[in-house]
Image: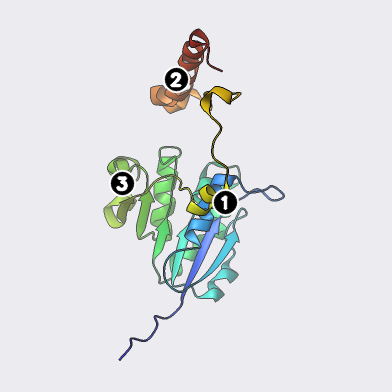
């Protein structure tokens, strides 16, 4: 006998994007990847920039996905208000998956928040440091390694082949933020690399 099709799962995906702005390409693709998980899923993606309102519980989700951008609310002004508005998530009796990035930024707040919400699984690019950065959550949750972003095969197929190196106007592109001193020596490395690479590229005639 053929097996019956699996029941549709209801997934609640919470993210944050500033109102009135287009999603950054990387964020858009990350969200799109999560909306294309295997299986039969009914996904509600909600922009919870002001916190997640409790009426979302009426959706009766089978799982809650806390996107990178939603967890980034922890370092914005007014976070405690957003945190209080989202506290009802802790009462949901379903798996809760968190996708933090920049785990070291406001790590203690992140740890407290995920523990408070009852996160069951943390998908992070630096699982080897979970015990140091988010000790309370790591003690109870499943910690899994993921990448910070993904490239959709359809995007690659729809774009023209890159121009030959000799005809490109810019040879090297690098983006880094000059982080404040409390990020320590590792926080300075990004811009130190940029400064050193700029000097080296000029000496080599690269743009």
Query: Residue 127 placed where, x, y %?
Result: 31, 45
Is label 2 in a helix, a strand or a loop?
helix
What label sits on residue 28 in the rendered view? 1
Q: Residue at position x 69%, y 47% from top?
A: 21
Q: Which residue is mark 3?
A: 135
Mark earlier in primary sequence (2, 1): 1
Query: Residue 122 placed where, x, y %?
Result: 36, 53
Report the mark closest to the observer, 3 or 2.
2
Task: Report, in whole angstroms, how far the alpha carbon at label 2 lies from the one at label 1.
Answer: 28 Å
Q: Is residue 93 above or below residue 23?
A: below
* Residues at circles 2 and 1 in contact by the CB criterion of under 8 Å: no
**Side (left or right) of 71 relative to 18:** left
Q: Is residue 6 above or below residue 32?
A: below
Is label 3 in a helix, a strand or a loop?
helix
Viewer can see residue 1: yes
Identify the colour scheme used. Answer: rainbow
Q: Quadrant of the N terminus?
A: bottom left
Query: Residue 152 placed where, x, y %?
Result: 49, 52
Q: Residue extending furthest top?
A: 203
Q: Quadrant of residue 185?
A: top left
**Side (left or right) of 139 relative to 195:** left
Query: Residue 159 placed where, x, y %?
Result: 57, 45
Task: Report, in whole angstroms, how far the alpha carbon at label 3 lies from the one at label 2.
Answer: 31 Å
Q: Residue at position x 39%, y 80% from top?
A: 6
Is label 1 in a helix, a strand or a loop?
helix
Neighbour tally class for label 3: few under 14, some 14-19, many 20 plus, Cα within 10 Å = some
Q: Is residue 160 above or below residue 52?
A: above
Task: Report, in whole angstroms, how far the alpha carbon at label 1 lies from the one at label 3.
Answer: 30 Å
Report the mark closest to the observer, 1 or 3.
1
Neighbour tally class for label 2: few under 14, some 14-19, many 20 plus, Cα within 10 Å = few
Q: Which residue is mark 2?
A: 193
């Amino acid at each position: 006998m053929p097996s019956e099709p699996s029941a549709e799962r209801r997934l609640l995906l919470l993210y944050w994007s500033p109102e009135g702005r287009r999603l950054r390409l990387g964020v858009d693709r990350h969200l799109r990847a999560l909306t294309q998980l295997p299986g039969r899923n009914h996904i509600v993606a909600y922009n919870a920039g002001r916190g997640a309102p409790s009426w979302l519980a009426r959706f009766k989700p089978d799982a809650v996905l806390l996107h990178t951008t939603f967890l980034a609310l922890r370092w914005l002004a007014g976070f405690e208000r957003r945190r209080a508005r989202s506290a009802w998530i802790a009462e949901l009796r379903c798996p809760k998956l968190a996708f933090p990035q920049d785990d070291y930024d406001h790590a203690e707040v992140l740890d407290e928040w995920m523990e408070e919400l009852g996160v069951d699984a943390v998908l992070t690019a630096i699982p080897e440091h979970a015990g140091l950065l988010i000790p309370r959550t790591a003690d109870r949750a499943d910690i899994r390694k993921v990448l910070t972003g993904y490239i959709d095969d359809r995007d690659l197929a729809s774009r023209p082949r890159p121009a030959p190196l000799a005809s490109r106007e810019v040879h090297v592109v690098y983006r880094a933020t000059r982080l404040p001193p409390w990020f320590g020596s590792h926080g300075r490395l990004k811009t130190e690399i940029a400064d050193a690479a700029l000097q080296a590229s000029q000496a080599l005639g690269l743009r």
